[in-house]
Image: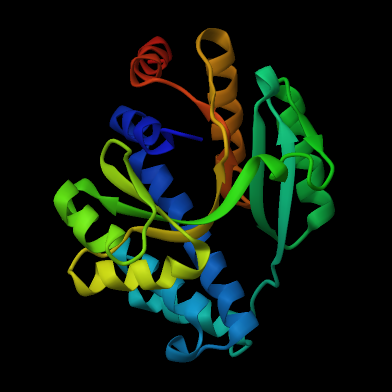
Amino acid sequence: MSGHSKWATIKHKKGAADAKRGKVFSKIIKEITVAARMGGGDIDGNPRLRKAVGVAKSNAMPADNIKRAIQRGTGEIEGVSYEEILYEGTGPGGTLFMVEVMTDNKNRTVAEIRKVFERHGGALGAGSSAQWAFDRKGTILVPKAAATEDQIMEVAIGAGGEDYTDEGEAWQVVCPLPQLDVVSSALEKAGIPPTESTAGYIPKNKKAITGREAERCLSLYETLDDHDDSQNVFADFEISDAELQRIAEASA
């Protein structure tokens, strides 16, 4: 969703920050566990794990939590085995959604995700029903407090980033997927650690929506994002800052 960070900022100011932080920790722990299971527990030899641990540290996750997540992934301590799945669907007004999940019970998860779509006027689709409308890119979030616009241009774009956008309290940098680690490393070396660095889906064309349609799409997006098994949600709708503020005030 274009503007998701701006919407998150508005929502956090309404008092949901602590709950959201717990959800972020849960997502990071799952990512670390899966990365360690797939590529081993050596951070230097496992780029996916190194990136996940970097994001964990930038979000102030305790070192013991990181260590246990790695050990669960490598099998040193008992843990849950997660499966990665990509779900695709449609939302109100013909909007398109991509949902990345990690689950230990895919039958339960698909049933729950299907119900979320249906309750919000959408439908869970078959494979490739939405993916055609997105480009696979690297996406990086950098807190506004950590970098100026000039620094983002100099460091991130200079290292291979394609574009950046103002997402309220953060800069979002988009780059070719092969450049994700390069751009993230350049930011870290410049003393600008990203809070998020991941492979994402960027819509080829954004759908501008307003009114009731915007409210329903935001509700669907939030409910999918809040699902326990959800790791990332991507959508092709776009809502203006003024409309986001209106919706937030109406739901206060």
Tell me the residue at 58%/23% (across/down): 217
List x then y, in percent, for residue 5: 38, 38
Q: Is residue 35 visible?
A: yes
Tell me the residue at 35%/45% (across/down): 18
List x then y, in percent, for residue 139: 44, 55
The answer to which image quadrant residue 190 occupies is: bottom left
Q: How is the image coloured?
A: rainbow
List x then y, in percent, for residue 103: 70, 59
List x then y, in percent, for residue 76: 59, 90
Judge from the rendering whether residue 72 lies leftward or rightward of residue 67; answer left or right. Answer: right
Judge from the rendering whether residue 123 lies leftward or rightward of residue 37; answer left or right. Answer: right
Q: Tell me: residue 32, above or below residue 102.
A: below
The answer to which image quadrant residue 88 occupies is: top right
Judge from the rendering whether residue 92 lies leftward or rightward of residue 155; answer left or right. Answer: right
Q: Tell me: residue 104, above or below residue 6.
A: below
The answer to which image quadrant residue 206 occupies is: top right
Tell me the residue at 65%/37% (across/down): 97
Judge from the rendering whether residue 198 lies leftward or rightward of residue 126; answer left or right. Answer: left
Tell me the residue at 37%/15% (across/down): 252
